[in-house]
Amino acid sequence: MAESILKAKLYTIMQRQHIERLEDLRGAVEEFAWGNQIRNYVLHPYRMVKDLRTDVETGDATGVLDGDLSSFIESYLRQTAGQNEAA
């Protein structure tokens, strides 16, 4: 009887540790809702794309829609590198 209780407690502890490891790997989870967008696209009356995380703007909306995200990626990496150096 005591052996089965011990096994159950060990199993519970192992489950909790596994869940904690998964949460650490996953990182912060945000809800996908209105107001959590990464970029704003304005296509009329003028063309502009603004990255809300880094405040980078470009007038080449067609290029961004075609996949040219290099300016946004570079700015984000510089920003995160600056935060890591400050920490």
Image (cartoon, rainbow, N blue to C red):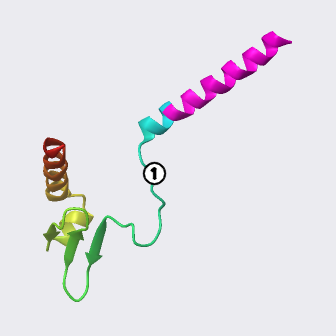
Spot occupied by residue 63 in the image (x, y as percentages of width and height): 18, 65
Spot occupied by residue 45 in the image (x, y as percentages of width and height): 22, 89
Q: How many marks?
A: 1
Q: Does residue 66 appear to the left or right of 24 in the view shown?
A: left
Spot occupied by residue 29 in the image (x, y as percentages of width and height): 45, 51
Quarter assignment of residue 30: bottom left
**Residue marked by disc 1:** 29
In this rendering, is residue 31 above or below 10? below
In this rendering, is residue 4 above or below 69? above
Q: Does residue 36 appear to the left or right of 50 in the view shown?
A: right
| Residues drawn in magenta | 1-20
| Residue at the limit of the structure toward the right, as seen here | 1
Q: Label 1 crowding class (10 Å Cα cut-off): few <14, some 14-19, many 20+?
A: few
Is residue 18 shown in magenta? yes
Is residue 9 shown in magenta? yes
SS for callout 1: loop
**Quadrant assignment for the C terminus:** top left
Magenta span: predominant SS is: helix
Write the residue at 18% across / 58% down: 72
Report the amino acid beneath label 1. Answer: Val
Q: Does residue 71 appear to the left or right of 27 in the view shown?
A: left
Quarter assignment of residue 66: bottom left
Write the residue at 31% across / 64% down: 38
Write the residue at 48% across / 31% down: 21
Q: Does residue 85 appear to the left or right of 67 in the view shown?
A: left
Write the residue at 19% across / 79% down: 47
**Quadrant assignment for the N terminus:** top right
Spot occupied by residue 67 in the image (x, y as percentages of width and height): 24, 58
Please state which of residues 31 and 4 is positioned toward the viewer in this rendering: 4
